[in-house]
Image: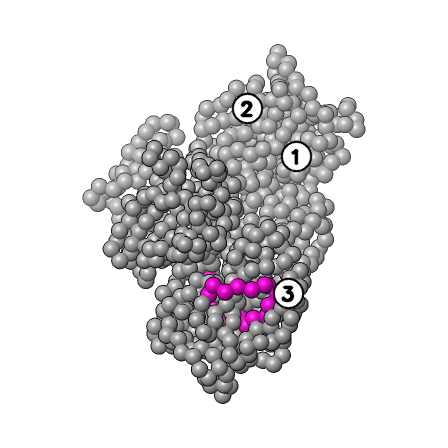
Amino acid sequence: MVCALLGVLSTSAQQMVLKYTDQDGVQQVLQMEVWRIDQMQFVPGNSVTLTDTPNIIDFGLGVRWADRNLGAASAKDPGLLIGWGDTTLTNYSTKLQYFPTTTAPAQISASQYDVAKVKWDESWHMPTEAELQELIDACNWEWVNDVENDSVGVVGKLKTDEAKTIFFPAAGYRQGKTEADKTAKGYYWTGMLGQATDKAKARMMSFSEGTPTPTVAEDFRYLGLAIRPVTGPVVVPTGLGTVTASSIEAQSATVTATLTGDLEDAPQVTIKYGTSADNLAYTKTVDEAASTITINLTGLLQNTTYYVKVILQTDNGTFDQTISFDTKKLDKFPVAEAVNLGLSSGTKWASWNMGSTSAMHVPETQYARYGWGDPTGEVHSLYASDYLISQNTSFKNGNIIDIAGTQYDIATVQWGTGWRLPRQSDFEELIRECTAERGTFTDANGVSHYGIKFIGPNGRSILLPAAGLRNSKGNLVSDNSLCAYWASTNLNNVSVPIPIVYSTSLSVDSKGPIYYQLAIRPVYEETSGSSSGSGGGESGGESGGEPGGESGGDSGQTQPETPSAGNAVDLGLSIYWADRNVGSSSASNVGYYIPWGDTQSRSDYSQSTYIHYKNNAYVVTGLQPLPAQYDAASQVWGGDWRMPTMEEWSDLINYCDWVEEGDGFRVYKKGSTKKSESIYLPTSGYKITDKGSVTTMSRSYCTYWTSTLSTTVQYKGAKGMAFLGRPSSDYKTVTVYDRYQGMPIRPVKNK
């Protein structure tokens, strides 16, 4: 007996119950032992045979069209309403799993899932979207409403010969066993899967009395729609043949993609690439119809693994391939070891300077001291305008405050992913947590020089030679007596970056013009897809979790100007949380300190300089959601990233597991212990301006802005809501702070 499964298997003790409806429509119940489940078999059900005798309409197009629908007795007959990919003609389900899934080809025309091919013969197939669009474009369309003669639908008249026509009945649609009014509209399947990522829909033609010219859209695959078969050649979907990388150098490579199939439609080819397979940050687009497409990638990082995804978008579907390759290492900038000093942040310091070959080596060549924002190491001009960073509009406007990890960072560009210039906070940590000794030191290669030895908490050490600097006149001064090193941080002034560690006071508040030539000692921090180079260094610090949701780097920008957007982590809440702060390239670093409703760090965190304080009063911007122009996450990272609300921080506190880790919190998805289902919140404190200088307060606390403005009457818009937590006491809350104070921001995005 043939039956259709309606119920779900259930078990009680050692029995299972199968509910079904037999071929006579009578509900049946079958009970058997559970152990028999491995003996169950599915057998073929009812098979429908069609006796259609279609005529052929030849408009001189790429294919010829049937004069009637599948299952129709005449051109006026609506025929059968069939689910997309159902070749049995008996599938009335409204569940997608009973129709071809994403494992089926994106184009089912002329395939095993094509009901026209299966039920008529192999010379017929469902029209592709391109074939349907060709017919639509070739005809003028009119609505026909001749109910008496059963002719309700649209007629297409060939533009070049209106005597040639084709009629499509308004067949309506079917959902389950319920059919919509067949005189209202017409819907016809193509063989093309829908473009949405969930693959729940397929492409179809629709028309109505008000819109007689058919249009192509998409709808759920389980709906029953009419099908008008065609005969003739199926356009072979254009596809990707091979994708290879060649001419690989330290900072460039050539990617070659071969295309297969019909190239007549001039497919668009998009190349996405980056240093992580999960975050392809850069994009190039090529529009050309050629069997071989060559793309030159420039501005790459040396000694770095790159991932390249070639995406081919055509009328017949999307095709893609991903490859990877490693760029070469530049000999003029030998990569150092990444030394773990046991610092709280996990940041590692290079064992020698850029351009050196050992700890105390200060080359006599030009590869010893560099201008700020010169990624090549070749510019030794006394004019700021000659440096690459000065050509950047954002820098000119005072908006770039940190070049660490960007295309202006010589350490990143020359040594590869993970390496960067140290920030001011890195120097401060080095001084704060290490023991410093001054004197003349001899390194392992026998090179001696005056400098500073920093001994870390774990006993390991690094040596910084006193390389002096070249001043505004180009003269080398204080060689062998002064340690002067660039930081990546800029004081929001075109000509005044923060450079320097002095051997005399170990201060990091000195500054100089970008054309000064200073030594550079890179730092290394582990990032997704990074490599520490050939120096044999240890692995980097904790990255704060693996990607748990959408990728955050597909922005289409050509180069990032700030540390790029982080990864989205799913903590089981209503939103995704980022794995790092705004302005940070890893979870362990704090990143930017930003006032509430501002979009950048400041050199002054006082009320008088706060951008939302005018005429002795606060400008209230307490709209929810916070407008994008006031949202630092949105402005710096772009895409769907935004600041979290007070309620979203409260959910993080109340519905996740918090564990003290290092100097911060590790926040896990409830019940999970997987790092991939967690984020790390480093302690940060907050910045204020006190007696004319910027001071970081409450360093042992985690403080993070929410996007919510305090609505308490007593504050009159003067305070914003912020998360406050102290790992050592497991204290967590959301409270108020003055809006002009600088705090980190941990972005979120909607699911």
- Please identify the residue farthest to the bottom as the structure is shown: 446
When the figure is inspected, residue 55 is found, relative to residue 453, above or below; the finding is above
Q: Quadrant of the C terminus?
A: top left
| Residue of label 1 | 132
Marks 2 and 3, the one that precedes in the sequence: 2
User: x, y percentage for residue 107?
Assistant: 58, 43
Marks 2 and 1, the one that precedes in the sequence: 1
Alpha carbon separation for disc pair 2 and 1: 18 Å
- Please identify the residue farthest to the right as the structure is shown: 160
Q: Are marks 2 and 3 in contact (CB under 8 Å)?
A: no
When the figure is inspected, residue 157 is found, relative to residue 643, above or below; the finding is above
Q: Which residue is located at x 52 percent, y 19 percent?
A: 181
Q: Which residue is located at x 44 percent, y 59 percent?
A: 586
Q: Amino acid at mark 2?
A: Gly
Which residues, given as a range, are shown in magenta?
Answer: 508-527
Q: Amino acid at mark 1?
A: Leu
| Residue of label 2 | 172
